[in-house]
Image (spheres, rainbow, N blue to C red):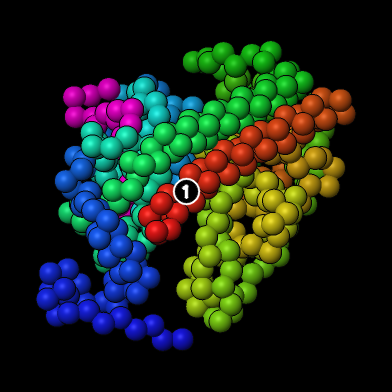
Amino acid sequence: MAVWSQVSVGFVIEADRFDGEYYKPDALVAIRRIAEKGGQELASMADILTGRTPSDYDDDGCLSVVRSGDLVAPLIYPTCERPFLKAQPSHDRFRLRRGDILISSIGMGSIGKISLVVDATDLITVSEVTILRDATIPPELLFTYLASSTGQSQIEREITGATGQQHLLKSKVGRILIPAALNDIGSALRNMVQETYERQEAGRVAYTAAESLLESALGLDKVDLTPRLFYEVEHSGVTKAKRFDAEYFTPREQNLIASLSRDHRTLADVARLATRRFRPKEDTEFHYIEIGDVTGCGTADSRPVPGVSAPSRAQWIVCSGDVITTTVRPIRRLSAIIKPEQTGFVCSSGFAVLEPTGIEPEVLLTYLRLPLVCELLDLHTTASMYPAISTTDLMRIPISLPDESTRDRIVANIRESFIARREARCRLHEAKRIVEEAILGG
């Protein structure tokens, strides 16, 4: 169905845009309504800054680096469970502040994402992130508006460049109109954002409890992980492992492997590798889960994609109860349970899709996200620029199971975590709804 917009030549020249998408009728109506009610350009209401990418990263660094892909988390703070890269302190780091609003300015799937910094302790950011600072209205209000459908519509209008090379320039961000009506709902929005944070933290605490239960039940808290400079291995051990790299044979890794192998089980004994191949249809939209959509709490978001635009990596169909885990850089702990409403969604070929057969999905998820297990997975990766573990090696990873009572407690904690996080999302969605009604209701 055709959609028509008529705009003056002067408007086109002033906007310096000639593409039809920029002049969608719904977007123009919303912008006109905001302007008529005293809306102001963002550039007049806040400082618009650009982050600075560290010249080097360091796994032992004390600073967490917030990148564009991390902005899938609406609230940013040190324990928000994003896989932040680390860096050491330096004079050229761009340090974040509490109340900063972050906008992803690059990256397919992440461009235009919005996050609010609620605790900036030891957080820095990079050049592909735009920062809004010292706004004339409370940051909770500005964040909620920009995250709403009306705010996102304005942001999407300002994205330029071809597919795969899109950018959201700082100068374009400054043109976004901010409605004056936000001041009338400020108290309600601030409370909702605070409640979102509290429920999100409750979810994190419940998940951490499940993780601690599993680590203790498996005895991982008692494994000797002391690093040693010198050690030796018999030739038969090297031949059996078919490995010659020193890292694999460190006492730390061998003690870990021995502890996890006590039941003589592997992942293949408790889960099946699902290979339901996806075949896109040009006229059919599907929901796509890529690596950046995995949250830090064991769930995954998705985005609708037209069949004609299906990425080549859109490969596996997922079903409720599946556990997806990244095979690329597994040290990042990116695993998730597929929810019932996500049955039929499609995930990237960068995931292995596991169908639990002898283990609860919640327990398998917790196991795959244990830091020590991710360390072991990382030990089996190959290649340097794009390190990945093969599905063959993945299914051979040892696993031990705690008793049924412990597993039940883990399942309960994980479900409690999911409920708390779902409540957090609901509070944020409610805040966005209030913003929409305030802007467009009258």
Magenta part mainly helix, strand or loop? loop
Q: Residue at x 60, y 27 (%)?
A: 202
Residue 124: give x, y in percent of width and height.
31, 31
Q: Residue at x 66, y 38 (%)?
A: 418
| Other-residue count near label 1 (Cα within 10 Å), few / some / many at <14 / 14–19 / ≥20 | some
Q: Residue at x 62, y 41 (%)?
A: 422
Q: Kindly identify which residue carries mark 1.
A: 434
User: Viewed as shown, does residue 63 lie left or right of 199?
Assistant: left
Front residue (pair 201, 347): 201
Looking at the rendering, the stretch of residues picked out in magenta corresponds to: 89-111
- Is residue 243 in sight in this rendering? no
Is 373 included in the stretch rendered in magenta? no
Front residue (pair 187, 224): 187
Front residue (pair 359, 226): 359
The quadrant of the picture occupied by the C terminus is bottom left
Secondary structure of residue under mark 1 = helix
Q: Residue at x 30, y 81 (%)?
A: 5
Residue 351: give x, y in percent of width and height.
60, 53
- Is residue 257 in sight in this rendering? yes
